[in-house]
Image: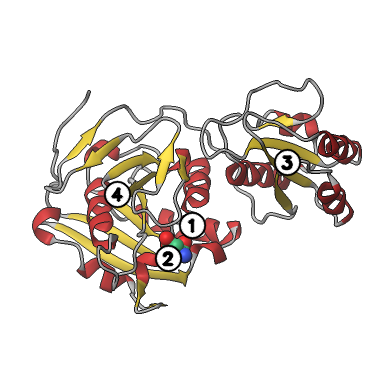
Amino acid sequence: MMSGSDKPGSNKKIVLLATGGTIAFENGALHLRAADLAATVDDRLLGAGVEILPVDFESLPSSSLTPADTLRILEEAEAAARDADGVVVTHGTDTMEEAGYLFSLHWQERAPLVLTGAMRPATTPGADGPRNLLAACLVAADARFIDGRPLVVMHDKIFAAGEITKVHSWDTDTFAGDFGPLGSVNPWGEIRLYRPQPDTREILPRPERYPEPVAILMVGSGGDGSEIDALVSAGYRGVVVAAAGRGGIPRGMKRAIDAAIDAGVIVVVASRCPLGGTATAMDPGDILWSGEINAPKARLRLMTGLAQWGPDRKRLSELF
Ligand code: ASP
């Protein structure tokens, strides 16, 4: 186990980019601005000489952000990173895994990029925003994360941003990942690393826009596939099926998937389980299997591929 406290040094600039989410909620509305959030960070734990520069970028619940919005946030974070030692993005937790995934596919800056948020609004007992934000700022200012992959810091845990899944709708300990956290931030502001950051750096082409709609459809027992037929009729070029367990698909739905593929639709099968993913190569046919990538992330991956290459099954199959 690697360990160390490596407190941030002096004269560091951390940009706090606020985009909304529960961390900005106060008395039932998105009231808190970036400066209000920055004011909650305890200077004594952050360390002398670390300055937080608040920037208001968006003020939305994360379920209202589109993938194109996420790319705009990413561009703003990149611009900030060129003149700062770290960037913290405050974001709703509902789609934080999707932002974290897209950030991981496209981030190439040296400065650490850290996403954080809250499960409880500022005016709710046990509000977790200040605790999460302090921990995120400590991580963003820590030299061990320079040149690394984007991170999510929530509930004292440091995760690789591309690996997390939201597994609980109200618990403050809401994120899990197949490989567990990378490390932790304790109440005294000390950072421990349990395992090295993932060394795989996969950078996919960044689309200007996402022209192809991709739907996610969750399997229910006895599904007859008529929903898939309807998606094909509605013009969807890609469908991600969140299948049962390691990839179970009801018979009727399999018929509809085959017909969709024959009609030129790209079908990716993920698991409806939050963790574990699908078996690979279960079907030698034209279904693409997402493996460990969950359905919302598989959708973004497919949208990214479709934007770049169109419905070229052979090329897209290299993504899965
Ligand atoms: N509705 C919130 C969101 O913007 C939930 C949260 O932040 O936890 O995602």
For mark 4, give the secondary structure.
loop
Quadrant of the rendered image containing residue 2:
top left
Cα separation, mark 4 vs mark 3, equals 35 Å
The residue closer to the viewer here, 314 or 239, is: 239
Say which quadrant the N terminus sits in: top left
- 113 w.r.t. 38: above or below: above
Disc 2 CB within 8 Å of nearest ligand 1 atom: yes
Say which quadrant the C terminus sits in: top right
Residue 128 lies, in percent from the top left, at 28, 59
Disc 1 CB within 8 Å of nearest ligand 1 atom: yes
Cα separation, mark 1 vs mark 2, equals 8 Å
Cα separation, mark 1 vs mark 3, equals 26 Å
For mark 3, give the secondary structure.
loop
Residue 55 visible in image: yes
How many marks do you count on the picture? 4
- 202 w.r.t. 102: above or below: above
- Residues tagged 1 and 2 counted as in contact (Cβ below 8 A): yes
The residue tagged 3 is: 221
The residue tagged 1 is: 94
For mark 2, give the secondary structure.
loop
From the viewer's perspective, tell me whether residue 148 is left or right of residue 62: left
The residue tagged 2 is: 21
- Residues tagged 4 and 2 counted as in contact (Cβ below 8 A): no
